[in-house]
């Protein structure tokens, strides 16, 4: 083995080989149920490997719930789903203390955990619930804990929130504030399937053949081990500098910002975006069989990392400029 500092040790090489085998197995199990959406599955796996959370923006009927449930089963993790509604209270998701009486007639407070105490939480239509309930979920995402009546309760590890938004119905919604959006590692756009994949869905789910049941490919402990492995992937100084420059170039006042950013962007991304972009690129590199990060890793993940962190102004809306167009300009300006 080479002495290059980018080469893994023998022990790490064995762990990487196991990592690749498990990831391939997960993809295969998910593919038995989910047709297409390969990029979305990859992004969800990256989110898990980084230890982050993901916001999924997609039309109704794009199999968001089925996708998340299937992935949870393939990962061997506990899964819960919460349908967010305007009357949902914080205790409906965190749980609450109740008074219980023992055999001797003594009364005491007992904590009854809510659906948030799981490994994979699907927060369906998160923008339909008031800010107070959103804030309870935010604490869980940020601190990996839930505080009820002044007592902090730790959540299981790993803990992974997938929140969905419907981009069509805005009436009766509570848009997530920028500070909360910033907590999500990715914002994934779940689009309609190509015609061939849609035909495959119709054929598969209208036949007499029973739906496939994915088998667990890993465990919670192994996922935590993989998260540690991802953080060990080295990043060269030049690639790390590229990540810093890319995020700085989304800020209109920065010298690196291209003309399109100065004209169409109101606020750029924070340093949290740089951290998430770098961590995500490490996970992508490992999933592609490399033990080093490239600029291409950064560019390929720029859209899901940055699209909810960069705020466009009204000129962009008037000129029909998309976030993807801006990010492509940023990438070109740094080459």
Image: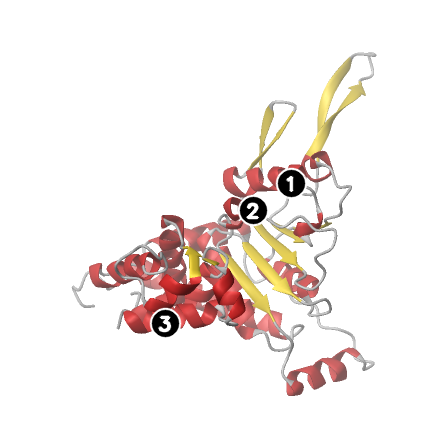
Q: Which residue is mark 2?
A: 177
Query: Can you give x and y, in whole percent of width and height, for residue 286 in the image?
Result: 38, 65
How far, Cα to Cα, is label 2 from label 1? 9 Å
> Residue at horizontal 47%, vertical 50%?
224
Label 2 with label 1: CB-CB less than 8 Å: yes
Query: Can you give x and y, in whole percent of width and height, for residue 123 in the image?
Result: 66, 51
How far, Cα to Cα, is label 2 from label 3? 26 Å
Q: How packed is label 1: few (under 14 Cα within 10 Å), some, or many (20 or more)?
A: some
Would you say 6 lies left or right of 172 here? left
How far, Cα to Cα, is label 3 from label 1? 35 Å
The reply to whether residue 286 is in sight is: no
Q: Secondary structure at mark 2?
A: loop
- Considering only order in the chain, which callout, 1 or 3, is on the residue closer to the N terminus? 1
Q: Secondary structure at mark 3?
A: helix
Asked if 46 appears above or below 208 in the picture, the reply is above
Q: Which residue is mark 1?
A: 131
Q: How packed is label 3: few (under 14 Cα within 10 Å), some, or many (20 or more)?
A: some
* Res 250 quadrant in image: bottom left
Asked if 128 appears above or below 335 in the picture, the reply is above
Mark identifier at residue 329: 3
Asked if 102 appears above or below 313 in the picture, the reply is above
Query: Can you give x and y, in whole percent of width and height, for residue 209 in the image?
Result: 79, 79
């Amino acid at each position: 083995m080479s002495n290059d500092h980018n080469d893994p040790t023998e022990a790490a090489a064995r762990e990487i080989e196991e990592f690749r085998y498990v990831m391939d197995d997960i993809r295969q199990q998910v593919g038995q149920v989910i047709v297409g959406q390969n990029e979305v599955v990859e992004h969800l796996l990256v989110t898990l490997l980084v230890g982050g959370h993901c916001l999924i923006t997609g039309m109704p009927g794009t199999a968001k719930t089925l996708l998340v449930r299937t992935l949870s089963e393939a990962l061997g993790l506990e899964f819960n789903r919460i349908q967010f509604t305007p009357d949902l209270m914080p205790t409906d998701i965190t749980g609450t203390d109740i008074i219980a009486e023992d055999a001797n007639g003594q009364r005491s407070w007992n904590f009854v955990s809510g659906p948030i105490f799981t490994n994979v939480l699907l927060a369906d239509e998160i923008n339909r619930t008031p800010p107070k309930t959103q804030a309870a979920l935010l604490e869980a995402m940020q601190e990996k804990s839930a505080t009820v009546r002044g007592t902090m309760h730790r959540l299981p590890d790993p803990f992974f929130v997938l929140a969905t938004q419907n981009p069509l119905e805005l009436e009766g919604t509570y848009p997530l504030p920028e500070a909360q959006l910033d907590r999500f590692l990715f914002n994934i756009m779940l689009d309609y399937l190509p015609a061939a994949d849609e035909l495959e869905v119709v054929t598969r789910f209208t036949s007499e053949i029973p739906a496939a049941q994915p088998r667990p490919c890993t465990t919670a402990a192994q996922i935590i081990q993989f998260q540690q492995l991802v953080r060990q992937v080295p990043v060269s100084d030049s690639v790390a500098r590229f990540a810093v420059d890319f995020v700085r170039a989304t800020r209109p006042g920065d010298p690196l910002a291209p003309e399109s950013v100065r004209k169409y962007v109101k606020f750029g991304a924070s340093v949290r975006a740089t951290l998430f972009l770098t961590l995500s690129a490490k996970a992508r590199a490992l999933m592609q069989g490399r033990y080093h990060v490239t600029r291409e890793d950064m560019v390929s993940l720029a859209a899901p990392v940055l699209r909810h962190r960069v705020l466009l102004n009204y000129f962009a809306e008037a000129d029909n400029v998309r976030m993807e167009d801006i990010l492509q300009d940023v990438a070109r300006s740094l080459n």
